[in-house]
Image (cartoon, rainbow, N blue to C red):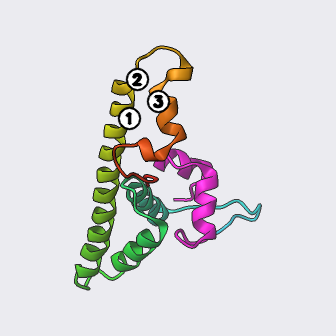
């Protein structure tokens, strides 16, 4: 096929620096190069990068993607390890959703409690200045 890195970038909709990063960390194999040292990619690279991009779009971390790629290279193996990876990720997603729901609730309460007068009496500013005034325990989301 012989795609340049720019062609691969456009085909899979992944930025060139991201492709280089994936090569650097071993998610993508280093491609062959021309005599002028330009990278050249084939259909397997397009498929692999598409897999990586889709997994990233679904929020999988690099290590999980690495494991999934390794599993995909052994199609005769049971898929239970892939199930476990997805179950872990699903648990993380569900925890983040719960945190976001609490965050949404807290922000709504802050707005509802605000008299919309002057900043010196603003309930939003007061709550942000004193975490103890929050109605829910919440932490960083993500």
Secondary element under disc 1, as helix, strand or loop, is: helix
Q: Residues within 10 Å of mark 1 (few under 14, many from 20)?
A: some
Range of residues picked out in magenta: 1-30
Query: Which quadrant does the C terminus fall into?
Result: bottom left
Instruction: Tell me the residue at 64%/69% (across/down).
Output: 24
Question: Residue at coordinates 60% horizontally, 67% vertically from top-left?
Answer: 23
For the residue pair 100 and 27, the one nearer the viewer reads as 100
Relative to 105, residue 94 above or below: below
Looking at the rendered structure, which numbered label has been put on residue 73?
A: none
Q: Say left or right for 18 vs 57.
A: right
Q: CA distance from mark 1 to mark 2?
A: 11 Å
Q: Residues within 10 Å of mark 3 (few under 14, many from 20)?
A: some
Q: Give x and y (percent) for residue 83.
A: 24, 74
Asked whether the viewer can see residue 104, the reply is: yes
Q: Earlier in the sequence, mark 3 or mark 2?
A: 2
The furthest residue to the top? 117
Residue holding disc 1: 107
Q: Nearer the viewer, mark 3 or mark 1?
A: 3
Residue underneath mark 3: 124
Q: Nearer the viewer, residue 5 or 34?
A: 5
Which residue is drawn at the image coordinates 25% and 85% (left, top)? Answer: 76
Label 3, label 1: how far apart the Cα atoms are: 9 Å
Q: Earlier in the sequence, mark 3 or mark 1?
A: 1
Residue tagged by mark 2? 114
In the displayed structure image, the side of residue 86 where residue 132 appears, left or right = right
Earlier sequence position, callout 1 versus callout 2: 1
Residue 4 at least partly seen: no
């Amino acid at each position: 096929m012989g795609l340049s890195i720019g062609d691969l970038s456009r085909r899979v909709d992944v930025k060139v620096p991201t492709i280089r990063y994936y090569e650097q960390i071993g998610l993508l194999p280093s491609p062959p190069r021309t005599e002028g040292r330009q990278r050249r990619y084939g259909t397997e690279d397009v498929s692999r990068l598409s897999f990586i991009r889709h997994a990233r779009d679904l929020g999988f971390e690099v290590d999980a993607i690495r494991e999934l790629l390794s599993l995909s290279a052994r199609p005769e193996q049971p898929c239970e390890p892939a199930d476990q990876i997805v179950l872990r990720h699903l648990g993380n997603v569900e925890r983040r959703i719960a945190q976001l729901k609490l965050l949404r609730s807290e922000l709504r309460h802050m707005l509802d409690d605000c008299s919309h007068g002057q900043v010196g009496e603003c309930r939003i500013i007061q709550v942000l200045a004193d975490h103890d005034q929050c109605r829910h325990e919440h932490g960083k989301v993500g």
